[in-house]
Amino acid sequence: MNQFNEFNFVQFSEGKTFNVVEVAPWQDYKTKELLGTEVTVVIMTDNTNYGEKKTGTNRFEKLKFKLRKQVDVPVDAQVIPINPVGKVYGDFNQNLSVHCDDIRVVEPKVHKQ
């Protein structure tokens, strides 16, 4: 049943910004085979509309974006995952795995004086 438990990451990410806190090799847990890159991000802003029931925020929660390629992304950069697919897992469906095709760095806005 868990294989059908997909997570709508696109909808989840609306109103959120993600900043990089770590970039590391992504390895298979059992075989230690290099699979690509794991980009750990923190949710810096969460302006998601949670409806009338204010359930709190996901601000400062960490996520890992897994990419099947090598990427070099600077720490502290704001990023957007390209074609993210989220899956919920764990004994209590408390974990989220996010695989994506690529990561796009958001260029900082330059304020003209």
Image (cartoon, rainbow, N blue to C red):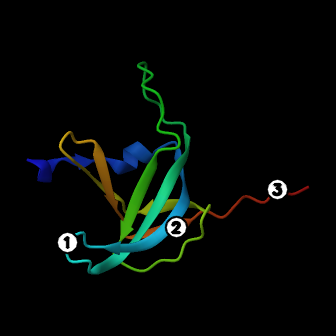
Q: Looking at the rendered structure, which numbered label has been put on residue 30?
A: 1
Residue at 73% over, 58% down: 109
Q: Nearer the viewer, mark 2 or mark 1?
A: 1
- Mark 2 surroundings: few (<14), some (14-19) or many (≥20) residues within 10 A: few
**Residue named by callout 2:** 104
- Mark 1 surroundings: few (<14), some (14-19) or many (≥20) residues within 10 A: few
Q: Looking at the picture, which amino acid does disc 3 mark?
A: His
Name the spot of residue 19 as percent of width and height, x first: 56, 56
Left or right of 43: which side holds 51? left
**Residue named by callout 3:** 111
Count of numbered marks: 3
SS at circle 1: loop
Q: Looking at the picture, which amino acid does disc 2 mark?
A: Arg
SS at circle 3: loop
Q: Quarter holding the C terminus?
A: bottom right
Residue 85 or residue 43, whichever sits in front: 43
- Of callouts 1 and 3, which one flags the residue occurring earlier in the amino acid sequence? 1
- Of callouts 3 and 2, which one flags the residue occurring earlier in the amino acid sequence? 2
